[in-house]
Image: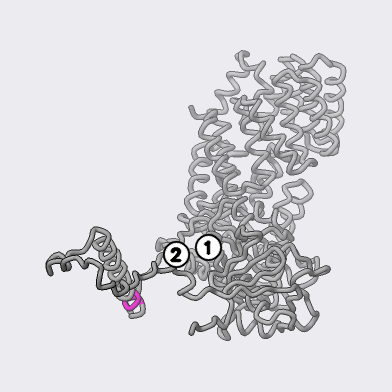
Amino acid sequence: MRETVSRPRTIRFGVFEVDLQLSELRKRGVKIKLQEQQCQILGILLEQPGEVVTRERLRRRLWADDTFVDFDHSLNTAMMRLREALGDSSDNPRFIETLPRKGYRFIAPVTEVPEPDLEDRLPEAPERAKAPEPRASSEVVPAALPETAALQPTRLGWRSAAITGFVLLALIGAGLLWRYLRHDRAVVVAPPTTRSIVVLPLENLSGQADQEYFADGMTDALTAQLAKISSLRVISRTSAMQYKGSHKLLSEIARDLNVDAVVEGTVLHSGNRVRITAELVQVSTDRHLWAETYESEMGDILALQSRVAQAIVNEIRINLSPQEKKLLATTRVVSEESYENYLKGRYYWNKRSEDGLTKAIEYFRKATQEEPGYALAYAGMADCYSIIGSAIVDTVPAGEVAPKAKAAALKAIELDDTLAEADTALATVRFNYDWDWAGAANGFKLAIEHNPSYATAYQRYSLYLMAMGRTQESMTEMNRARALDPLSVSMNFSLGWRLYMAHQYDQAIKQLGATIDMDPNFGLAHRVLGESYEQKGLYPEALDELRKAVAISHHSPPMLASLGHAYGVSGRKQNALKIIDQLKEESASRYVSPFYLAVVYAGMGEKNQALESLERAYQDRSNRVVFLKVDPQVDNLRSDPRFQALLQRLALPK
């Protein structure tokens, strides 16, 4: 008598079917990818459909007692993703109902599909030949075969014997292998290699909007810790932040960013205590490799970040050099006030606006006053001073910000000579203001060596290479920066700007259009897109984009200058002269680099006035002067001996 199967292997509900043994969910026969934990939750709910499964029961079934995990967040996340896979809603559930403060209940009708018995799954054996009926005495009975002939099998018999022998050998081999695997000498299957990772924005559990900067800062810090590892590609914070509050599946995010693993988690900052919960997911296998909760006082926050980073590195089995091990293990103690001011500084630094940079400088200054040995805060301050006087912002004279930028960068390196942020800040000062070309190049290379995943270092090195006229090398470094920060508006704009400077206007237009799709209010992208249209003689399109840039920037001098240049080139001299008047009027109340007057005069074909303004810009050490070798807006001045003499005085390397 056959033995019935007590537990079904497959359960059907609606258009779905779940295989409990294989942990597979299928919709109309098509497999839907679920992470292991989500499939376990579904299996537990289906054990008793229609009955309440408490959250505590799920906790006991899913996590061992010695597992440190933010259970509530992890369960909520897993349940959310399970519902997404089922196309279900917590507000109007078809499958999984939430019972507040109790648990969950599977409410859809289910059908159990018992697993077929082994005998049912095998093909029917051919019916054995029946023994011959006794013959009548009148029948002729053939003579008996010789004994040797009776023992000879037919060819079909030999084939059956061979198959039978092969099956027996296979079964014996499988049995031996099973016994081998059950003993200590187990076969070890290497886990998938992790070479790239992203730290998704850590969720702020405080419930207070004014603590968002803290959660973002912790995300930034953890990203920076992992980025110190040369063999690991770490996606930059800016791209990761695009997924803040997103309900996108981890597999989709990983595909967007081209990474092997994802870190997600939560931050709770309450009083003088901080708790971080982090989970590591291997995307290729949908496995939760690791989950743990860490807690410390604010004064120990840097050590806490280091412990989380080391745990992740251990799980993904990356080989570290002795230097990298030292970097990860090195921590410093900072006060709560100093650390919070540093995080606020980073928050405003990431805005890349004049107002944001001004606020960031103030917070970084406070952090260094409270903690004079805080190298990262000095590096942040140096970078802000470098940017605010550069071609992007250019609202402060170089002579005013350059000494402050250099002093802060040197202090940061004195305190910690392994910081890529400090190396980049000092190299930027040497490039923007000192015009120390060799020192700048060496500094950018050192920054990349110290942090191979620091996208800003590649971005700035690309800028240096473009100024030197090494356009192809510049594009290579810029593409490396963008690969580390693919969703950053700044990185995508920078690529478009370099294409423009390289006189590749069609590619620039395409790239800058994509950047504007990412952020329609990004004035710099509108400006360079307009400049690219102008170089192709598409003046209506150019003027349209440049007017947008001027409006978005509230009539900033760089935007006005580009509009004035386009007016001049397109034959609208009166409009260009009005821009000249505006710039001169603006210079009475704020700094306006003479370079921008030169740009408008060049567009009008007024070479003498353009070259006189360029000379004044050179004396001011205006950052835009360093791009004279490639800048399309001054192409009509290149043949003039005075322009060539100016280039020689810049002493740009060949």
Tag 1: residue type?
Thr
Q: Nearer the viewer, mark 1 or mark 2?
A: 1
Left or right of residue 298, residue 131 in this image: left
Q: Reply above or below: 615 against 53.
A: above
Tag 2: residue type?
Pro
Residue 557 pos. (x, y %)? 79, 33
Left or right of residue 509, residue 589 in this image: right
SS under mark 1: loop
Residue under label 2 = 191
Residue 490 pos. (x, y %)? 68, 44
Overall secondary structure of the magenta section: helix
Pick whichever, 489 or 373, lies toward us.
489
Pick whichever, 356 or 33, lies toward us.
33
Residue 415 pos. (x, y %)? 54, 61
Q: Are marks 1 and 2 in contact (CB under 8 Å)?
A: yes
Colouring mode (rainbow / by chain / secondary structure / one colour) = one colour
Q: Reply above or below: 470 against 149.
A: above
Pointer 2 local density, CA inside 10 Å: few below 14, some 14–19, many at least 20: few
Residue under label 1 = 285
What residue is drawn where x is 70% and y is 53%?
242
Q: Reply above or below: 588 against 338.
A: above
Left or right of residue 23, residue 582 in this image: right
Q: Reply above or below: 452 against 38.
A: above
* Residue 342 appears in view: no
- Which of the two labelled residues, at mark 1 and mark 2, occupies the earlier sequence position? 2
Pick whichever, 347 or 278, lies toward us.
278
SS under mark 2: loop
Q: Which residues are magenta?
A: 177-181
